[in-house]
Amino acid sequence: MLEITVFGASDSVGKSCLMISDKDHHVIIDAGIQLHPRKTRMLSTPPEGVDVFAPELTALLLSHAHIDHSAYIPALYRAGYKGLTYMTTPTRDILQILWKDHLKIEGPHHYGVSDMHKAQSKISIHKYNKKFKIADGITAEFYNASHILGSSSILIDWEGTRIFYSGDFNNAKTPFHDPMVYPDPDNPIDILLIETTNADRQIASRKVVTSDLTKSLLKCYARGGKAIIPSFALGRSQEIQAYLMNDFDSFLHKFPLYVDGMILEMNEIYRKYLTRDWVSQRILLELKDKGLTSPFDHDGIHSIDEISPHGKRIKKREMLSHNQKSHIALTTSGMLEGGPVYDYLRYHAGSKLNGLYVVGYQVEGTVGHQIVSGDTDLVLDDGFGDVFEVQLNLEIKQFEFSGHASLEGLLEMVRYTHPKKIIALHGEPSAQQTFSESAMDNGYETSILVTREYLPEYP
Ligand SMILES: [Zn+2]
Ligand SMILES: [Zn+2]
Protein backbone atom coordinates (compact mmCIF):
# COMPACT_ATOMS: atom_id res chain seq x y z
CA MET A 1 0.00 0.00 0.00
CA LEU A 2 1.41 3.37 -1.07
CA GLU A 3 0.55 6.82 0.21
CA ILE A 4 1.31 10.09 -1.52
CA THR A 5 1.51 13.29 0.56
CA VAL A 6 1.85 16.72 -1.02
CA PHE A 7 3.65 19.41 1.02
CA GLY A 8 3.62 22.19 -1.58
CA ALA A 9 2.70 23.12 -5.20
CA SER A 10 -0.52 21.12 -4.87
CA ASP A 11 -2.58 24.00 -6.25
CA SER A 12 0.01 26.64 -7.16
CA VAL A 13 3.48 27.06 -8.65
CA GLY A 14 6.26 27.19 -6.03
CA LYS A 15 7.67 25.05 -3.16
CA SER A 16 7.25 21.75 -5.01
CA CYS A 17 7.55 18.89 -2.54
CA LEU A 18 5.80 15.54 -2.19
CA MET A 19 6.40 12.22 -0.49
CA ILE A 20 5.65 8.63 -1.49
CA SER A 21 5.47 6.22 1.44
CA ASP A 22 4.76 2.63 2.42
CA LYS A 23 5.17 1.04 5.86
CA ASP A 24 8.97 0.83 5.47
CA HIS A 25 9.99 3.82 3.38
CA HIS A 26 9.41 7.52 2.79
CA VAL A 27 10.79 8.97 -0.46
CA ILE A 28 10.65 12.73 -1.11
CA ILE A 29 10.50 14.14 -4.64
CA ASP A 30 11.69 17.76 -4.89
CA ALA A 31 11.94 20.18 -1.96
CA GLY A 32 11.55 23.76 -3.13
CA ILE A 33 10.60 27.09 -1.64
CA GLN A 34 8.11 29.76 -2.67
CA LEU A 35 9.61 33.14 -3.47
CA HIS A 36 7.49 36.28 -3.08
CA PRO A 37 7.60 39.55 -5.03
CA ARG A 38 10.18 41.87 -3.50
CA LYS A 39 7.68 44.62 -2.70
CA THR A 40 5.85 42.30 -0.24
CA ARG A 41 9.12 42.21 1.79
CA MET A 42 8.23 38.61 2.70
CA LEU A 43 10.88 35.93 3.13
CA SER A 44 10.37 32.77 1.07
CA THR A 45 7.88 30.16 2.29
CA PRO A 46 8.91 26.52 2.89
CA PRO A 47 6.86 23.41 2.03
CA GLU A 48 4.38 22.77 4.85
CA GLY A 49 4.99 20.02 7.40
CA VAL A 50 7.79 18.07 5.70
CA ASP A 51 10.43 18.67 8.43
CA VAL A 52 9.06 16.07 10.86
CA PHE A 53 9.70 13.32 8.31
CA ALA A 54 13.33 14.36 7.66
CA PRO A 55 15.02 11.97 10.17
CA GLU A 56 13.19 8.92 8.79
CA LEU A 57 13.44 9.54 5.04
CA THR A 58 14.85 6.80 2.81
CA ALA A 59 15.75 8.97 -0.18
CA LEU A 60 15.36 12.37 -1.79
CA LEU A 61 14.94 12.67 -5.58
CA LEU A 62 15.35 16.00 -7.34
CA SER A 63 13.89 16.70 -10.81
CA HIS A 64 15.82 19.90 -11.62
CA ALA A 65 17.73 22.82 -10.14
CA HIS A 66 15.12 25.61 -10.11
CA ILE A 67 14.77 27.17 -6.63
CA ASP A 68 11.06 26.27 -6.37
CA HIS A 69 12.10 22.59 -6.56
CA SER A 70 15.52 22.51 -4.89
CA ALA A 71 16.13 25.27 -2.35
CA TYR A 72 14.64 23.48 0.66
CA ILE A 73 16.96 20.46 0.35
CA PRO A 74 19.70 21.83 2.68
CA ALA A 75 16.95 22.58 5.23
CA LEU A 76 15.93 18.90 5.25
CA TYR A 77 19.52 18.00 6.21
CA ARG A 78 19.28 20.60 8.98
CA ALA A 79 16.05 18.88 10.09
CA GLY A 80 17.86 15.55 10.43
CA TYR A 81 17.93 13.85 7.02
CA LYS A 82 21.09 11.74 6.65
CA GLY A 83 20.62 9.96 3.32
CA LEU A 84 21.41 10.82 -0.30
CA THR A 85 19.86 13.29 -2.77
CA TYR A 86 19.67 11.81 -6.28
CA MET A 87 19.89 14.15 -9.28
CA THR A 88 21.41 14.51 -12.74
CA THR A 89 25.04 15.61 -13.07
CA PRO A 90 24.39 19.14 -14.45
CA THR A 91 21.80 19.74 -11.70
CA ARG A 92 24.54 19.25 -9.10
CA ASP A 93 26.74 21.90 -10.75
CA ILE A 94 23.90 24.41 -11.08
CA LEU A 95 22.99 23.98 -7.40
CA GLN A 96 26.53 24.93 -6.35
CA ILE A 97 25.65 28.42 -7.62
CA LEU A 98 21.92 28.65 -6.82
CA TRP A 99 22.04 27.53 -3.18
CA LYS A 100 24.89 29.91 -2.39
CA ASP A 101 23.11 32.77 -4.17
CA HIS A 102 19.90 32.07 -2.27
CA LEU A 103 21.79 32.13 1.04
CA LYS A 104 23.38 35.47 0.07
CA ILE A 105 20.01 37.03 -0.78
CA GLU A 106 17.92 35.66 2.08
CA GLY A 107 20.42 34.84 4.85
CA PRO A 108 20.17 31.67 6.98
CA HIS A 109 16.36 31.69 6.93
CA HIS A 110 15.92 28.01 5.96
CA TYR A 111 19.52 26.73 6.14
CA GLY A 112 23.06 27.85 6.96
CA VAL A 113 26.41 27.34 5.23
CA SER A 114 27.10 24.06 7.06
CA ASP A 115 23.69 22.62 6.07
CA MET A 116 24.43 23.55 2.46
CA HIS A 117 27.83 21.81 2.61
CA LYS A 118 26.25 18.75 4.20
CA ALA A 119 23.63 18.61 1.41
CA GLN A 120 26.35 19.02 -1.25
CA SER A 121 28.35 16.13 0.22
CA LYS A 122 25.32 13.82 0.00
CA ILE A 123 24.57 14.22 -3.71
CA SER A 124 24.38 11.10 -5.88
CA ILE A 125 24.66 11.94 -9.61
CA HIS A 126 23.05 10.07 -12.52
CA LYS A 127 22.61 10.16 -16.29
CA TYR A 128 19.33 9.99 -18.17
CA ASN A 129 17.78 6.58 -18.89
CA LYS A 130 19.91 4.61 -16.42
CA LYS A 131 17.91 2.91 -13.72
CA PHE A 132 19.37 3.04 -10.18
CA LYS A 133 18.36 1.51 -6.85
CA ILE A 134 17.29 3.72 -3.95
CA ALA A 135 16.13 0.94 -1.54
CA ASP A 136 15.29 -2.76 -1.64
CA GLY A 137 12.48 -3.09 -4.18
CA ILE A 138 12.58 0.60 -5.22
CA THR A 139 14.35 1.94 -8.31
CA ALA A 140 14.37 5.32 -10.04
CA GLU A 141 15.30 6.55 -13.52
CA PHE A 142 15.69 10.10 -14.90
CA TYR A 143 14.15 11.05 -18.27
CA ASN A 144 15.15 14.22 -20.14
CA ALA A 145 12.31 16.69 -19.44
CA SER A 146 13.63 19.34 -21.92
CA HIS A 147 12.86 22.16 -19.46
CA ILE A 148 16.40 23.37 -18.59
CA LEU A 149 19.84 21.75 -18.68
CA GLY A 150 19.76 18.56 -16.60
CA SER A 151 16.00 18.71 -15.96
CA SER A 152 14.23 15.39 -15.57
CA SER A 153 11.00 13.56 -15.21
CA ILE A 154 11.39 10.64 -12.82
CA LEU A 155 10.14 7.07 -13.23
CA ILE A 156 9.92 5.18 -9.94
CA ASP A 157 9.33 1.47 -9.74
CA TRP A 158 8.10 0.74 -6.21
CA GLU A 159 7.81 -3.04 -5.86
CA GLY A 160 6.08 -3.20 -9.24
CA THR A 161 3.99 -0.05 -8.95
CA ARG A 162 5.18 2.38 -11.66
CA ILE A 163 4.99 6.08 -10.74
CA PHE A 164 5.95 8.81 -13.23
CA TYR A 165 6.65 12.33 -11.91
CA SER A 166 6.71 14.81 -14.81
CA GLY A 167 8.61 17.55 -12.98
CA ASP A 168 8.62 20.73 -15.07
CA PHE A 169 8.71 19.54 -18.69
CA ASN A 170 8.49 20.86 -22.22
CA ASN A 171 7.27 19.00 -25.28
CA ALA A 172 8.33 21.76 -27.70
CA LYS A 173 11.63 21.74 -29.57
CA THR A 174 14.04 24.32 -28.07
CA PRO A 175 17.65 25.05 -29.09
CA PHE A 176 19.30 22.75 -26.59
CA HIS A 177 16.67 20.04 -26.27
CA ASP A 178 14.50 17.78 -28.36
CA PRO A 179 10.90 17.33 -27.22
CA MET A 180 10.39 15.07 -24.21
CA VAL A 181 10.73 11.29 -24.77
CA TYR A 182 8.30 9.27 -22.63
CA PRO A 183 8.76 5.88 -20.97
CA ASP A 184 7.85 2.78 -22.98
CA PRO A 185 4.13 3.16 -23.88
CA ASP A 186 3.69 -0.64 -23.87
CA ASN A 187 4.41 -0.66 -20.16
CA PRO A 188 1.72 1.66 -18.71
CA ILE A 189 2.18 3.88 -15.69
CA ASP A 190 0.13 3.31 -12.53
CA ILE A 191 0.30 6.85 -11.15
CA LEU A 192 1.17 9.97 -13.16
CA LEU A 193 2.08 13.08 -11.14
CA ILE A 194 1.94 15.91 -13.67
CA GLU A 195 2.67 19.65 -13.71
CA THR A 196 -0.11 21.87 -15.15
CA THR A 197 1.54 25.34 -15.29
CA ASN A 198 0.37 26.25 -18.81
CA ALA A 199 -2.87 24.23 -18.99
CA ASP A 200 -5.02 27.33 -19.40
CA ARG A 201 -2.53 29.59 -21.18
CA GLN A 202 -2.14 29.93 -24.95
CA ILE A 203 1.53 29.60 -25.87
CA ALA A 204 2.66 30.73 -29.34
CA SER A 205 5.11 28.44 -31.12
CA ARG A 206 8.84 29.04 -30.55
CA LYS A 207 9.22 29.89 -34.23
CA VAL A 208 6.68 32.74 -34.02
CA VAL A 209 8.06 34.08 -30.72
CA THR A 210 11.69 34.10 -31.87
CA SER A 211 10.87 35.70 -35.20
CA ASP A 212 8.90 38.45 -33.37
CA LEU A 213 11.89 39.07 -31.08
CA THR A 214 14.26 39.21 -34.03
CA LYS A 215 11.99 41.74 -35.82
CA SER A 216 11.89 44.01 -32.75
CA LEU A 217 15.68 43.86 -32.40
CA LEU A 218 16.13 44.80 -36.07
CA LYS A 219 13.79 47.77 -35.68
CA CYS A 220 15.61 48.88 -32.53
CA TYR A 221 18.92 48.72 -34.41
CA ALA A 222 17.45 50.62 -37.39
CA ARG A 223 16.43 53.55 -35.18
CA GLY A 224 19.86 53.60 -33.53
CA GLY A 225 18.64 52.27 -30.19
CA LYS A 226 20.03 50.01 -27.49
CA ALA A 227 18.12 46.90 -26.46
CA ILE A 228 17.77 45.43 -22.97
CA ILE A 229 16.67 41.80 -22.57
CA PRO A 230 16.03 40.93 -18.91
CA SER A 231 16.20 37.17 -18.56
CA PHE A 232 16.35 34.26 -16.10
CA ALA A 233 20.01 33.31 -15.59
CA LEU A 234 19.41 29.62 -16.13
CA GLY A 235 17.93 28.18 -19.31
CA ARG A 236 16.11 31.06 -21.00
CA SER A 237 19.30 33.15 -21.31
CA GLN A 238 21.27 30.36 -22.96
CA GLU A 239 18.32 29.70 -25.25
CA ILE A 240 18.25 33.38 -26.33
CA GLN A 241 21.98 33.27 -27.07
CA ALA A 242 21.53 30.12 -29.16
CA TYR A 243 18.64 31.70 -31.12
CA LEU A 244 20.66 34.82 -31.80
CA MET A 245 23.66 32.73 -32.86
CA ASN A 246 21.42 31.09 -35.50
CA ASP A 247 18.82 33.68 -36.56
CA PHE A 248 20.84 36.83 -36.00
CA ASP A 249 24.25 35.43 -36.90
CA SER A 250 25.83 38.03 -39.18
CA PHE A 251 23.81 40.85 -37.64
CA LEU A 252 25.43 40.26 -34.24
CA HIS A 253 28.58 41.83 -35.64
CA LYS A 254 26.75 45.14 -36.16
CA PHE A 255 24.46 44.85 -33.13
CA PRO A 256 26.54 42.91 -30.57
CA LEU A 257 25.15 41.17 -27.52
CA TYR A 258 26.68 41.81 -24.08
CA VAL A 259 25.93 39.25 -21.37
CA ASP A 260 25.86 40.30 -17.72
CA GLY A 261 25.05 38.90 -14.25
CA MET A 262 24.69 35.27 -13.18
CA ILE A 263 24.01 34.28 -16.81
CA LEU A 264 27.79 34.22 -17.29
CA GLU A 265 28.25 31.55 -14.60
CA MET A 266 25.39 29.49 -16.02
CA ASN A 267 26.91 29.77 -19.53
CA GLU A 268 30.02 28.04 -18.17
CA ILE A 269 27.94 25.13 -16.85
CA TYR A 270 26.10 24.82 -20.16
CA ARG A 271 29.45 24.85 -21.96
CA LYS A 272 30.62 21.89 -19.87
CA TYR A 273 27.59 19.77 -20.82
CA LEU A 274 27.35 20.43 -24.56
CA THR A 275 27.56 16.69 -25.28
CA ARG A 276 25.12 14.15 -26.67
CA ASP A 277 24.32 12.93 -23.12
CA TRP A 278 22.69 16.24 -22.21
CA VAL A 279 21.75 18.30 -25.29
CA SER A 280 20.24 17.66 -28.73
CA GLN A 281 22.21 16.45 -31.74
CA ARG A 282 20.80 19.52 -33.51
CA ILE A 283 22.66 22.13 -31.45
CA LEU A 284 25.90 20.16 -31.69
CA LEU A 285 25.64 20.06 -35.51
CA GLU A 286 24.77 23.78 -35.68
CA LEU A 287 27.83 24.59 -33.60
CA LYS A 288 30.04 22.35 -35.73
CA ASP A 289 28.71 24.07 -38.85
CA LYS A 290 29.70 27.46 -37.49
CA GLY A 291 33.05 26.24 -36.17
CA LEU A 292 32.05 27.11 -32.59
CA THR A 293 32.34 25.11 -29.37
CA SER A 294 29.38 26.95 -27.78
CA PRO A 295 26.92 29.74 -28.70
CA PHE A 296 28.73 31.92 -26.15
CA ASP A 297 31.90 31.82 -28.30
CA HIS A 298 30.18 33.58 -31.23
CA ASP A 299 32.23 36.69 -32.01
CA GLY A 300 29.12 38.89 -31.73
CA ILE A 301 28.40 37.62 -28.19
CA HIS A 302 30.49 39.19 -25.42
CA SER A 303 30.81 39.08 -21.66
CA ILE A 304 30.48 42.40 -19.82
CA ASP A 305 33.95 41.61 -18.47
CA GLU A 306 35.42 42.10 -21.97
CA ILE A 307 34.70 45.83 -21.61
CA SER A 308 37.65 46.10 -19.30
CA PRO A 309 39.63 43.37 -17.52
CA HIS A 310 39.61 45.17 -14.16
CA GLY A 311 37.16 46.96 -11.89
CA LYS A 312 33.60 46.45 -10.77
CA ARG A 313 30.89 45.44 -13.21
CA ILE A 314 28.81 48.51 -12.37
CA LYS A 315 31.63 50.65 -13.84
CA LYS A 316 31.81 48.43 -16.94
CA ARG A 317 28.05 48.83 -17.48
CA GLU A 318 28.47 52.57 -17.40
CA MET A 319 31.32 52.35 -19.93
CA LEU A 320 29.23 50.13 -22.21
CA SER A 321 26.18 52.37 -21.92
CA HIS A 322 28.09 55.55 -22.72
CA ASN A 323 29.52 53.91 -25.80
CA GLN A 324 27.42 55.38 -28.64
CA LYS A 325 27.33 52.12 -30.59
CA SER A 326 24.05 50.19 -30.56
CA HIS A 327 24.12 46.95 -28.63
CA ILE A 328 21.92 44.43 -26.84
CA ALA A 329 22.31 43.75 -23.10
CA LEU A 330 21.16 40.31 -21.90
CA THR A 331 21.00 40.39 -18.13
CA THR A 332 19.27 39.33 -14.90
CA SER A 333 16.80 39.40 -13.28
CA GLY A 334 14.13 37.93 -15.52
CA MET A 335 11.21 39.50 -13.64
CA LEU A 336 13.12 42.75 -13.00
CA GLU A 337 13.20 42.07 -9.26
CA GLY A 338 16.71 43.55 -8.92
CA GLY A 339 19.98 42.62 -10.62
CA PRO A 340 22.16 44.39 -13.22
CA VAL A 341 19.10 45.14 -15.40
CA TYR A 342 18.47 48.10 -13.04
CA ASP A 343 21.77 49.69 -14.09
CA TYR A 344 20.82 49.33 -17.76
CA LEU A 345 17.41 50.88 -17.09
CA ARG A 346 19.08 53.75 -15.29
CA TYR A 347 21.02 54.58 -18.47
CA HIS A 348 18.57 53.62 -21.23
CA ALA A 349 14.99 53.96 -19.91
CA GLY A 350 14.68 57.63 -20.85
CA SER A 351 15.11 57.34 -24.64
CA LYS A 352 12.37 56.32 -27.07
CA LEU A 353 15.02 54.89 -29.37
CA ASN A 354 15.80 52.08 -26.90
CA GLY A 355 13.83 48.92 -26.18
CA LEU A 356 13.08 46.64 -23.21
CA TYR A 357 12.26 43.14 -24.44
CA VAL A 358 10.85 40.83 -21.76
CA VAL A 359 11.28 37.14 -22.65
CA GLY A 360 9.35 35.28 -19.99
CA TYR A 361 6.22 35.02 -17.90
CA GLN A 362 5.95 37.76 -15.24
CA VAL A 363 4.39 36.79 -11.91
CA GLU A 364 1.80 39.21 -10.52
CA GLY A 365 3.28 41.58 -7.94
CA THR A 366 6.75 41.63 -9.54
CA VAL A 367 8.31 44.75 -11.11
CA GLY A 368 8.29 42.92 -14.46
CA HIS A 369 4.52 42.42 -14.21
CA GLN A 370 4.09 46.09 -13.33
CA ILE A 371 6.07 47.08 -16.44
CA VAL A 372 4.29 44.78 -18.92
CA SER A 373 0.97 45.97 -17.43
CA GLY A 374 1.82 49.53 -18.52
CA ASP A 375 3.31 51.27 -15.44
CA THR A 376 5.93 53.76 -16.62
CA ASP A 377 6.87 55.56 -13.39
CA LEU A 378 8.77 53.20 -11.15
CA VAL A 379 10.75 53.22 -7.94
CA LEU A 380 13.44 50.55 -8.25
CA ASP A 381 15.01 49.01 -5.14
CA ASP A 382 17.93 46.65 -5.76
CA GLY A 383 17.65 45.15 -2.26
CA PHE A 384 21.19 46.24 -1.39
CA GLY A 385 20.45 49.88 -0.50
CA ASP A 386 20.20 51.44 -3.98
CA VAL A 387 16.72 52.93 -4.47
CA PHE A 388 15.99 55.23 -7.42
CA GLU A 389 13.13 56.55 -9.52
CA VAL A 390 12.93 55.90 -13.22
CA GLN A 391 10.56 56.90 -16.00
CA LEU A 392 10.22 54.41 -18.83
CA ASN A 393 10.13 56.10 -22.22
CA LEU A 394 11.71 53.22 -24.11
CA GLU A 395 9.76 50.68 -26.19
CA ILE A 396 8.41 47.81 -24.04
CA LYS A 397 7.47 44.42 -25.47
CA GLN A 398 6.85 40.98 -24.02
CA PHE A 399 7.63 37.72 -25.84
CA GLU A 400 5.92 34.60 -24.49
CA PHE A 401 8.75 32.11 -24.21
CA SER A 402 7.85 29.26 -21.88
CA GLY A 403 9.75 26.26 -20.56
CA HIS A 404 6.54 24.37 -19.81
CA ALA A 405 4.31 22.13 -21.92
CA SER A 406 1.07 23.46 -23.41
CA LEU A 407 -2.25 21.73 -22.69
CA GLU A 408 -1.69 19.58 -25.81
CA GLY A 409 1.71 18.64 -24.41
CA LEU A 410 0.21 17.63 -21.07
CA LEU A 411 -2.39 15.47 -22.81
CA GLU A 412 0.34 13.94 -24.97
CA MET A 413 2.17 12.83 -21.81
CA VAL A 414 -1.09 11.33 -20.52
CA ARG A 415 -1.64 9.40 -23.77
CA TYR A 416 1.93 8.06 -23.90
CA THR A 417 2.10 7.00 -20.26
CA HIS A 418 -1.52 5.78 -20.21
CA PRO A 419 -1.83 6.05 -16.40
CA LYS A 420 -4.42 4.37 -14.18
CA LYS A 421 -4.42 7.38 -11.89
CA ILE A 422 -3.41 11.04 -12.45
CA ILE A 423 -2.56 13.66 -9.84
CA ALA A 424 -2.39 17.28 -11.10
CA LEU A 425 0.26 19.51 -9.51
CA HIS A 426 2.29 22.71 -10.05
CA GLY A 427 -0.46 24.92 -11.49
CA GLU A 428 -3.02 27.50 -10.45
CA PRO A 429 -6.47 26.05 -9.59
CA SER A 430 -7.92 27.24 -12.92
CA ALA A 431 -5.09 25.51 -14.84
CA GLN A 432 -5.60 22.28 -12.87
CA GLN A 433 -9.32 22.42 -13.55
CA THR A 434 -8.81 22.94 -17.29
CA PHE A 435 -6.34 20.06 -17.42
CA SER A 436 -8.58 17.80 -15.36
CA GLU A 437 -11.59 18.42 -17.66
CA SER A 438 -9.53 17.81 -20.79
CA ALA A 439 -8.07 14.61 -19.33
CA MET A 440 -11.59 13.47 -18.45
CA ASP A 441 -12.72 14.10 -22.05
CA ASN A 442 -9.94 11.70 -23.02
CA GLY A 443 -11.19 9.09 -20.55
CA TYR A 444 -8.80 9.75 -17.64
CA GLU A 445 -9.75 10.61 -14.09
CA THR A 446 -7.62 13.23 -12.31
CA SER A 447 -7.19 13.98 -8.60
CA ILE A 448 -6.47 17.51 -7.44
CA LEU A 449 -5.06 17.39 -3.92
CA VAL A 450 -4.61 20.13 -1.38
CA THR A 451 -1.43 20.54 0.64
CA ARG A 452 -0.96 17.90 3.37
CA GLU A 453 -3.63 15.73 1.81
CA TYR A 454 -2.91 12.02 1.44
CA LEU A 455 -3.79 9.86 -1.48
CA PRO A 456 -3.92 6.58 0.43
CA GLU A 457 -4.31 2.91 -0.33
CA TYR A 458 -2.91 2.56 -3.78
CA PRO A 459 -3.03 0.21 -5.62
ZN1 LIG B 1 11.45 24.68 -13.38
ZN1 LIG C 1 8.67 24.60 -11.22
Image: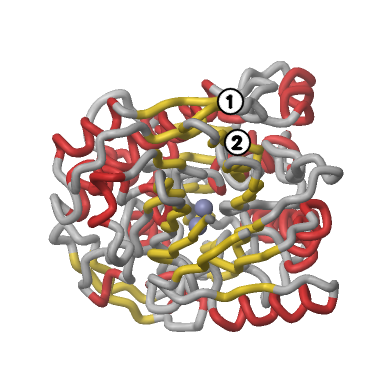
Q: Residue at x 61, y 23 (%)?
A: 274
Q: Residue at x 78, y 23 (%)?
A: 285
The secondary element bearing badge 1 is classed as loop
Q: Are marks 1 and 2 in contact (CB under 8 Å)?
A: yes
Check the image and tell me how it is coloured. secondary structure
Residue 291 x %, y %? 71, 16
The secondary element bearing badge 2 is classed as strand
Q: Is residue 454 above or below residue 55?
A: below
Drawn side of residue 352 relative to residue 222, left or right: left
Q: Amino acid at mark 2?
A: Phe
Q: Amino acid at mark 1?
A: Lys
Q: Residue at x 24, y 61 (%)?
A: 382
Whether residue 148 is visible to the viewer of this picture, yes or no, is: yes
Residue under circle 2?
142
Frontmost residue, 52 versus 432: 52
Whether residue 226 is visible to the viewer of this picture, yes or no, is: no
Drawn side of residue 343 relative to residue 368, left or right: left
Q: Quadrant of the C terminus?
A: bottom right
Residue 440 x %, y %? 78, 77
Question: Badge 2 local density, few (<14 within 10 Å), some, or many (20+)?
Answer: many
Frontmost residue, 23 versus 104: 23
Q: Quadrant of residue 344?
A: bottom left
Residue under circle 1?
127
Residue 8 x %, y %? 40, 65
